[in-house]
Image (spheres, grey):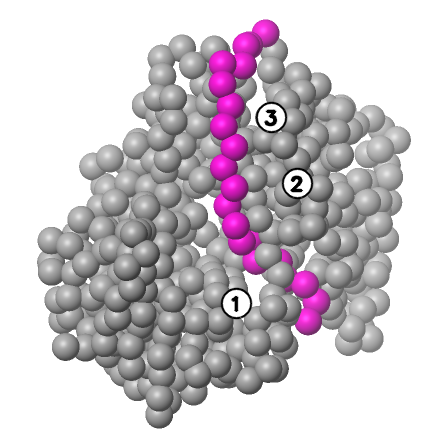
Amino acid sequence: MARSVILGAGVAGLAAAYHLQRLGEKDPLVLEKNPYPGGLAATMEWNGCRMDLGPHRIHTVYPRADELITEMVGEDLIVRKRTSQIFLDGQWMDYPPRAGEMFRKLGLLTAAKIGLSALQGKVRGLKNKVTGNPPESYGDYLAERFGPYVRELIFDPFALKVYREEADDLDVMVAKVRLASQGIFSMLKEAITGKTASAVKKFRYPKQGMGLISARLQQHIEKEGGEVLLGHEATRIRHTGGLVRSVEFEDPNGEKMSVEASRVITTIPLPILVDLLEPKPNQAVRDAAENLTYADSFLVYTLVNRKPLTPNCWMYFPGDETVFSRVYEICHFSPEMTPEGQSCLCAEIPARPADPVQFTDEEDLKQRVWEGFVETGMARDAECIDQVVLKIPRAYPIYRKGYKEDLGTILEHLSTLGNLISTGRHGLFHYNNSDHSLEMGRLAAEYARQTPEKSEGWYSKRDEFDRYRIVD
């Protein structure tokens, strides 16, 4: 008997299955190739530590996502104070910046250059507004909002470090999604008034890690009659007459199986989805899928004999003095997640397929991370107890200029399959947070139930998700 099949047990896929059940379906099937649920919001265990795959926190403006989180882990939520710093020009400063500290530590000359840069950006922005030339690239946006000096000091090196692209080669959507602040003057206003739109001051967090949300969702889905098969990888999606008919998959032992599908909600990366379709899409669609760009993320976890090692949840490193771009210290999210007297820090290293870090020996990578801790003063007098490296493929969608055309080609083809809905961070090539993915899973389930064999309306909604904003 045909049933709904969900590809991917990240938060979007599990939310889709959960909401399908609430809408009357009892037996959705969720297939996940990894041996654990949660996707990018999973929690791992190592050396007595519980470790998220990168820093996560709960702060949402979406009531339905908040309701679901509260239902799943409400009794396990704790409230934490957000503290973060940036290591800039050899010095530590609060992030978001405080005007007095920034000018005091960087010096009056640098402060004057920042002010002049801001004025230059303001003039450029007004001129472009008059002539009807809105920014088209991330670099254009930065030049208007922050001016040339600040762009070169902070944002250009950080873009190259995180996205592995020059700012001028990135689409302006990067700024719209990632930069809540509207420029130097807005940043200074926030610093002086204490009212900020670019970062939260407090956040909620499950005391056993973000993976608890996915674990509880899996339990709920299975309790209500659905299935979540971990370690099961989809190998083919067969369709005829504009509808998906079946999904083929393999279990952890390589045994091949097939399930008749009434609908498919997929959250897997679009290049993988395109490759699974049978019959295959035309060459233009396959080329567009190959053109979509991602950055992998190497996560180097370091266990030390001091707790806490730093006063910060997050730390940012735009310069080239460290191999990592961001570090988070787990005990500041929940003290229960690390052993007594020990702390665990996660250093993130974004990398494209051809980057040297992809071919670096793990022991060398660990050493470079620890050296970065020492050189920036983070290590203090602590000793490194142990380290482990995890690689997250396709962690970050990269909005290169021209990506919208390639994405549009793919989604136009997917809209010809009436009962296939692609959603979530990977499924719509959309850089977002976990609460956004919960929303996208819910909306996909609701759309699939309301319009069971007509998916083009779903893909026309993709631009609505561009209103999602990442707030640090």
Q: Amino acid at mark 3?
A: Glu
Range of the magenta residues?
Answer: 381-402
Q: Amino acid at mark 2?
A: Phe
Specify which label sits upstream in the sequence, 1 or 2. Answer: 1
Q: Which residue is mark 2?
A: 359
Q: Amino acid at mark 1?
A: Pro
Residue 83 can be seen in this image? no
Q: Nearer the viewer, residue 370 or 142?
A: 370
* Residue 465 image offset from top left, x and y in percent: 47, 67
Residue drawn at 50 percent across, 78 percent down: 411
The CA distance from mark 1 to mark 2 is 23 Å
Outermost residue, top side: 381
Specify which label sits upstream in the sequence, 3 or 1. Answer: 1
Left or right of 254 in this view: 328 = right
* Residue 162 image offset from top left, x and y in percent: 65, 46
In what element is the residue under mark 3?
A: helix
Residue 271 marker: 1
Q: Are marks 2 and 3 in contact (CB under 8 Å)?
A: no
In what element is the residue under mark 2?
A: helix
Mark 3, other Cα within 10 Å: few <14 / some 14–19 / many ≥20: few
Task: State which quadrant residue 170 falls in.
Answer: bottom right
Height in image: 69 above or below 28? above
Height in image: 129 above or below 389? below
> The N terminus lies in which quarter of the figure?
bottom left
Task: State which quadrant residue 115 falls in.
Answer: top right
Residue drawn at 43 percent across, 48 percent down: 40
Q: Which residue is mark 3?
A: 363
Residue drawn at 40 percent across, 32 percent down: 51
Outermost residue, bottom side: 241
